[in-house]
Amino acid sequence: MLNAMAHKLILRVYRYKPDREPYYDTFPVEVPDTANVLDAIERAWDDHDRTLMFRHACHHASCGSCGLRVNGCEKLPCVTPVADYADGATLTIEPMRNFPLITDIAVDASPLFERMQLVGMPIIREAEPLRADGKTIFPEGVRDFDRFENCIECGLCLSACPSMAADPLYLGPVALAAAERVLATSSDSAKRSRILELIDDEHGLWRCHSAWECTEVCPYQVNPAEAIMRLKRIVAAEKFKRLFHR
Amino acid sequence: MSVEVEPKPVGRKPLQWFDVRGRRVGMWAYVAMRLSAIGLVLYLFLHLVILSQLAVGPSAWDGFVALAKSPAFLALDVILIVGILAHGLNGLRLTLVGLGIGVPRHKTMLWIGLVLTLALALLSALAIFAAEG
């Protein structure tokens, strides 16, 4: 049997309501040392202030809805152990950046889904059928599932990307990783042309200045930065070829 | 069915470029790249202002040359060399990974660039101060 010890934290939480200036609230909480940061936020809500608004659903890094920043760094609090922080530590809890803020630490995630739709990557995927021997039957044109399929659309990469701060219309890491996946798996020339046109744009691929933060904060090792570098190579090669085939 | 929608604008906040709280080495390199770029552009204008002393006459230029040989000014030269090396070598790294070369080893390339920057800056400092010593 596990004997959980009590873990004390001070949560310094960003508060925002549309009718007043943003401020920070401080909530002392005590949770088991086996708990995650989301449990601590829920404890603050339960013990101190039930007007505190935050997004969450599954509690196991499947839905991707609880993303926020802990001490300035993007995290999925549902899988971030409180034991990562010293007993008695102060955690500054803030909403994700580069998303419209609804209230407190809850953001409007629609910019993420709008970008995914632009790329044509299905948000709700079709079921992935299995053969009798348990192996996956791949959709037509798909040879293998890549790391991109791990993406839970949490938006941490959009929040961490510094280029998003300079261009609100930048496609961003997740959509570019999806575009790379589409190019890698589709032989449909019309679809490929549309994707190439979309990413080779002032709000596209070339906005990435290689800070690598998207890959660093991704909770599922999707590695968008490497996908973007592969895309840059593909697009640069296409442009180079066009120089000699006018 | 696919739906065409425009991304929702989220507002410009370029100061985020310099927010390194909780960030890793790639973001530090990103910030260093921007700060060194700003420094080099400022240096370019300073350089042009200094060259304009030539138009004033020999006495003004001789006065500047005497100032340029002071240890504090020579230290500024070393800082300039650090900026040029750091910016140039990191730029080379970004060009390579942008072409898909050495992508999984981008952090190693960063550390190599940093070591080269420090080593070459040290050699330059020794040469500069020995020449004026």
Image (cartoon, coloured by chain):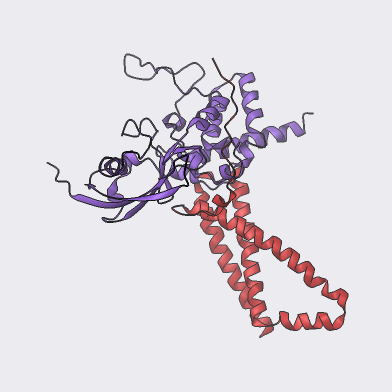
Chain colours: A purple, B red
Q: Is residue B49 left or right of residue B119?
A: right
Query: Where does the image place residue A206, in percent across and percent down from the top left?
Result: 64, 40
Q: Is residue A149 left or right of residue A35?
A: right
Quarter of the image where the N terminus of chain A is located: top left
Q: Nearer the viewer, residue B127 or A33?
A: A33
Residue sitting at x 26%, y 55%: A87
A133 in relation to A56, above or below: above
Quadrant in the picture for residue A154: top left
Q: Nearer the viewer, residue A191 or A67?
A: A67
Residue sitting at x 65%, y 68%: B80
Query: Where does the image place residue B56, in percent across and percent down from the top left?
Result: 87, 77
A183 in relation to A16, above or below: above
Q: Nearer the viewer, residue B10 or A170?
A: B10
Query: Where does the image place residue B66, in percent across and percent down from the top left?
Result: 75, 84
Quarter of the image where the C terminus of chain A is located: top right
Q: Nearer the viewer, residue B57 or A244?
A: B57
Residue sitting at x 57%, y 52%: B15
Quadrant in the picture for residue B131: bottom right
